[in-house]
Amino acid sequence: MRDFTVTMCVRLLETLRNKGYSFSTVSGYRNSAAAKTVILRHDIDARPGKALEIAGLENELKIRSTFYFKATQGRFDSKLVKEIAGLGHEIGYHYEDLSKSRGSFEKAIERFARNLEELRKICPVTSACMDGHVLSRWNNLDLWKKYNYHDFGIAAEPYLDFNFSEFLYITDTGRKWNAVQYSLYDKVNSGFHYRNKTTPMLIRDLENDSVPDRLMITLHPQRWHNHAGMWMQEAVFQRMKNIVKYVIIKIRSGSSVS
């Protein structure tokens, strides 16, 4: 069975549920007393229609998760955001303000506040998550070295408000699981070193009880397709993108590209 299909995504979510994991939004985790918990989040970087598809499937599975939306020229797709919020999911701000402001902290925080206000006109927002764009010289998380997101009514930032010595963080960045060689920003310092690269392998490990009880999983909806043509297009595009990202990361780290 092909990986990174919607069918495989549903199979992963069903396995988590069947193994006794309780699903939580990012902001809602502090109200969770479940021993086995997965904080499920989605970063909407492209193909926003796929976000609605995944949100609907999760709703059918009685799963609530967090969807992070970017601002496009200071605007959000209000219809789409309302539909996903209406399915019971949390909406958060996927900020890239320091990158967009080319490293100007003053412009970045003004942009952050303005975009957050626009998103809050659509629905409540208490969570924000940085966008880690490998082509950018600026890490959007650095914005909080000078400012405090709590001052803007943000209760949780996934990269900053969780103890990753207790959580295994798993991300499909690079269209593989925890492919750190293709990720400059979407990674955490953790005592866990999970390196399985396919969803079937992750499902196998869940079924064998060899995965920790606390997880944070990042899924990018645009990566998951049942349609063969769209699946192939995403696979080819991501493979090319990974090569570029790998070279950039090597250059920035001062390592040779083998």
Image (cartoon, helix red, strand yellow):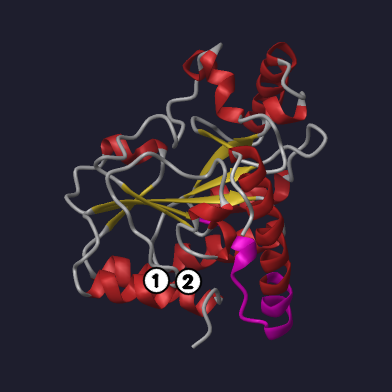
Q: Are marks 1 and 2 in contact (CB under 8 Å)?
A: yes
* Crowding at mark 2 (Cα within 10 Å: few <14, some 14-19, many 20+): many
Relative horizontal placement of residue 98, taking residue 36 as reference (left or right):
right
Mark 1 secondary-structure assignment:
helix
Q: Looking at the rendered structure, which numbered label has been put on residue 12?
A: 1
Q: Nearer the viewer, residue 44 or 55?
A: 44
* Crowding at mark 1 (Cα within 10 Å: few <14, some 14-19, many 20+): some
Q: Which residues are magenta?
A: 219-234
The chief SS type of the magenta part is helix
Q: Amino acid at mark 1?
A: Leu
Compared to residue 14, the image places residue 82 above or below, namely above
Q: Which residue lies under the disc numbered 2?
A: 9
Residue 211 magenta-highlighted: no
The quarter of the picture where residue 160 lies is: top left
State the quadrant of the C terminus.
Answer: bottom right
Q: Nearer the viewer, residue 246 or 42?
A: 246
Q: Nearer the viewer, residue 184 or 132?
A: 184
Compared to residue 252, the image places residue 116 above or below, namely above
Residue 233 magenta-highlighted: yes
Q: Amino acid at mark 2?
A: Cys
Q: Position of residue 63 (x, y in %)?
A: 39, 59
Mark 2 secondary-structure assignment:
helix
Q: Position of residue 128 (x, y in %)?
A: 54, 33
Is residue 127 visible in the rendered structure shown here? yes
Residue that appears at 44% across and 68% down: 197
Residue that appears at 51% across and 13% down: 151
Q: Position of residue 156 (x, y in %)?
A: 43, 30
